[in-house]
Image (cartoon, helix red, strand yellow):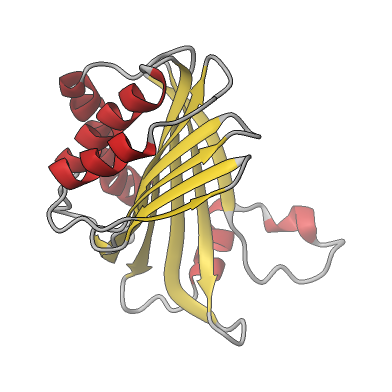
Amino acid sequence: MTKIINHQTNQVNFTLIPKQKIDSVDTTKLKNKLSDIFENSKTIMTEFPEITIIFDPNNQISINILRDQNRIIIADNNVTPYSGRSLDNFFKFTKEAVDIINNNEIKDYGFNILSNLDLQNDLTDSGEFIKDNFISKEKFISLGTLKSAGLKIVYENNSIRCQLIIEPRMGQELEPTKSIILNHNSHFSKKSLPDLTMLQTECQEIYNSLPGNIERLF
């Protein structure tokens, strides 16, 4: 088993698909709710007919209301160590923001985690590591010499459809590094957001289990 180190979270977000087309949005209520939940909240808003973006740079919270795609994306963009990251206020704000936007008339939603990590010190090429451990290199002989690889895996766990993307991080000159980029999505089909307690329990469990799942794969 390969040890992972320096695991950081770059973003967590909810992608929500309403049952009905999004119409008008009470942006004042959304901004007030940000101030209620997050300390020192300060918002910047950009609005067009097809999109409304509210961003709180002090707390790195963003709300993207995409009318043309009929999606709502609420994100916590803070970069922190993976372990110990507090998500309670983010879950609370997401739940209350969706109630403000459309009374939680949601038909599907996804909980997404974007993070990166390093492999143990004696491994310096993350793409080569993925290639050697997960890829049948013989299948690519016709293309040339396979130097690096990534993975996209779709699986189901407890009736939740999940997608995991594992990619090597390259340097500015495309040189190999020991870093790996992870993108994990949990898709809840035909479900509105549950109450806050259930939302926290479900999504915190998904968040907490990811590092152990990755360690077992590696």
Residue 45, given in percent of the width and then of the height, sits at: 42, 53
Q: In this view, does 204 lie to the left or right of 184?
A: left
Answer above or below: position of 161 versus 1: above
Q: In which quarter of the image is residue 95?
A: top left
Q: How many labels does the image show?
A: 0
Q: Where is residue 11 in the image (x, y as percent from the top left)?
A: 36, 54
Q: Left or right: 88 with respect to 102?
A: left
The residue sitting at 61% across, 87% down in the picture is 173
- Residue 157 vs residue 89: left or right? right
Q: Nearer the viewer, residue 13 or 72?
A: 72
Residue 105, x across and y down, in percent: 43, 14
Q: Residue at x 74, y 56 (%)?
A: 138
Residue 176: image quadrant is: bottom right
Q: Is residue 63 visible to the viewer in this orientation of the structure?
A: yes
> Where residue 203 sits: x, y (%)?
27, 32
58 and 171: which one is in front? 58
- The answer to whether any part of residue 188 appears in the image is no
Q: In this view, does 53 lie to the left or right of 194?
A: right
Quadrant (top left, top right, bottom left, bottom right) of the N terminus: bottom left
Q: Which of 181 and 5 is in front in this view?
A: 181
- Name the residue: 47% across, 78% down: 177
Which residue corresponds to the image point at 26% horizontal and 39% vertical from the top-left? 209
